[in-house]
Image: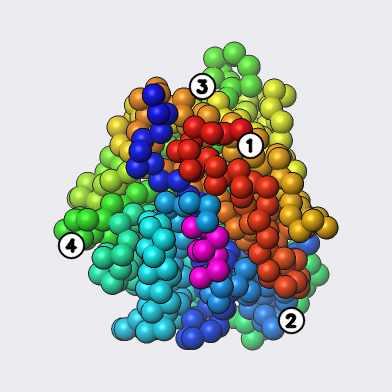
Amino acid sequence: MARFPEDFLWGGATSAAQIEGGRCEDGKGLSHLDYVYYRGPKRPCNFMLLDDYKKARIEEATLNFPNRRGIDFYHRYKEDIALLAEMGFKSFRMSVSWTRLFPTGKEEKPNPEGVEFYHNVFRELHKYGIEPLVTMIHYEMPYGFVDEGNGWETDMIIPYAVKYMKFLIDEYKGEVKYWLTFNEINMVNAVPFLGGGIILDRPGPTSKIDFDSYTPTPEITFERKGPPPTANFARWDQASHQALHHQFIASAMVVKYAHETAPNCLIGNMFNLHHLYPETSSPKDAYRAHEETEFNMLFCDVMAKGYYPAWMLSWYKKHNINIKWYDNYEEILANGKVDFISLSYYLSTVVTADPARQEKIGSFIRFLRNKYLETSDFGWQIDPIALRISLNELRDRFNLPIYIVENGIGAFEELGEDKTVHDDYRISYLRSHIEAIADAIEDGVDVIGYTPWGCIDLVSCSLVSMSKRYGFVYVDADDEGNGTYDRYRKDSFYWYKKVIASNGEDLD
Ligand code: BG6
């Protein structure tokens, strides 16, 4: 018997900021991500500190921004879509750049060139029978909202974001059936600047950012391990959960609108799933793993069930988090439940109840190594079985279709003399995860699609670099933005083509 449904949506995933480039072309405005810059191979930079953000804003002409060019999808989308079509894609996950349509976020009318660009992309996809899956907000907002309201921490952004998302539905509902409101909504808690435009050490959410009095300071240390030095976790939790509440509200309003005006469209949530194991069979470790899983599920619960789970409200109380609830929020959430669950899945993690060994980053914890698992070049623990377990749990909890919209392995890669990359590790990673999905389907989970991340090499989100690569297609560009930007098929390209052609039967 076939292991995957006949209409299974095989494809791949990207985001606008990581592929498009065309940073200031044809009327595009700047987003807060446009100010995140490359700081070296091991230095993620997500700007939780005001000083860092100011530096980027003031020195923007001199700092290197790989996102400026992305992979130049803005100019090469036809060539790229042809490559996806050659692999047999049924689905392509992409996002729309808010600032390409509404350059400052406050315009009455959208930028016509931006509007046309996305029509052209959707048209090109449909030419090959590829269904677009569109994320409305993939870690991007017009940067003015950072200055004015500290991103999503205040509610001033909500009407503008809702207007933008409703516009997407109105304009593109004839071309796009599958939508996601926010990418990895839980990341606003883990990485407040990235997910919410929140600068943590700002004097107050609505205080003005004064760039005139800026004098460059020595570089701030924000190494891969450990939080920024000034991190104040009480403030971190308060700001990020308030922002999350605002995102839930905006999302629910848009879901309701789509249900009323675009019955052909289906809208999903999107959260980062990381399966958690207790380190030992101690009940305390088991409880810790349970608690973290519940925490992670909050992000689905609110969007799929339409209310905050009771334990979360008591967690807020216990941690002195005072959410300023949006007017009529209960009704808004109840009326804006998503149609399907979507998730990114890369790794599983281990937790312990021992506080001395469990480092906390915001409300998230820094995870421990699992001695049974191998890791990627970047230390991400590879665990397809955890995906199967989690898919089963999600089925039981929500009983909704599930779209796996990110999964994959980032690696250092170079183009060989034979003009390809022999990425057998990628084939093996994806093969094991596709097997796990097939098992979950056999378990009765309704998985409707699979779009591995970075199907064409793109700019890494955490490292803001090209050297962490995920693609089936190699892009000749480096971390400094040098290169021909030409595309080359990797070994995995031919393998995935076979997988799709056989509807997941031929994984050799
Ligand atoms: C997800 C994001 O968190 O993971 C993507 O939605 C991101 O934008 C992907 O690129 C992989 O992370 P990274 O840091 O390896 O690019």
Local crowd size for mark 4, using a 10 Å CA cut-off: few (<14), some (14–19), many (≥20): some
Q: Quadrant of residue 62?
A: bottom right
Q: Amino acid at mark 2?
A: Thr
Secondary structure under badge 2? loop
The residue under label 2 is 62
Quadrant assignment for the C terminus = top right
* Marks 2 and 1 in Cβ contact (< 8 Å): no
Of marks 3 and 2, which one's residue comes earlier in the chain? 2
- Disc nearest the viewer among 3 and 2: 2
**Which color scheme does this rendered protein use?**
rainbow
Which residue is painted at 55% across and 65% down in the image? 80
Q: For the residues carrying marks 1 and 3, which lies nearer the camera in this image?
A: 1
- In-front residue for pair 149/266: 266
Q: Are marks 1 and 4 in contact (CB under 8 Å)?
A: no
Percent x, y for residue 362? 57, 46
- Residue 429 is marked as 1
Look at 52% across and 70% down and name the residue there. Answer: 77
The residues bearing labels 4 and 3 have C-alpha atoms spaced at a distance of 44 Å
The type of residue carrying mark 4 is: Thr
- x%, y% of residue 125? 42, 63
> Of discs 2 and 4, which sits in the foreground?
4
Of callouts 1 and 4, the N-terminal one: 4
Q: Secondary structure at mark 1?
A: helix
Query: Viewer-nearest of labels 2 and 1?
Result: 1
Magenta-highlighted residues: 78-85
The amino acid marked with disc number 1 is: Tyr
What residue sits right under mark 3 in the picture?
287
Whichever of callouts 4 and 3 sits on the residue coming sooner in the sequence is 4
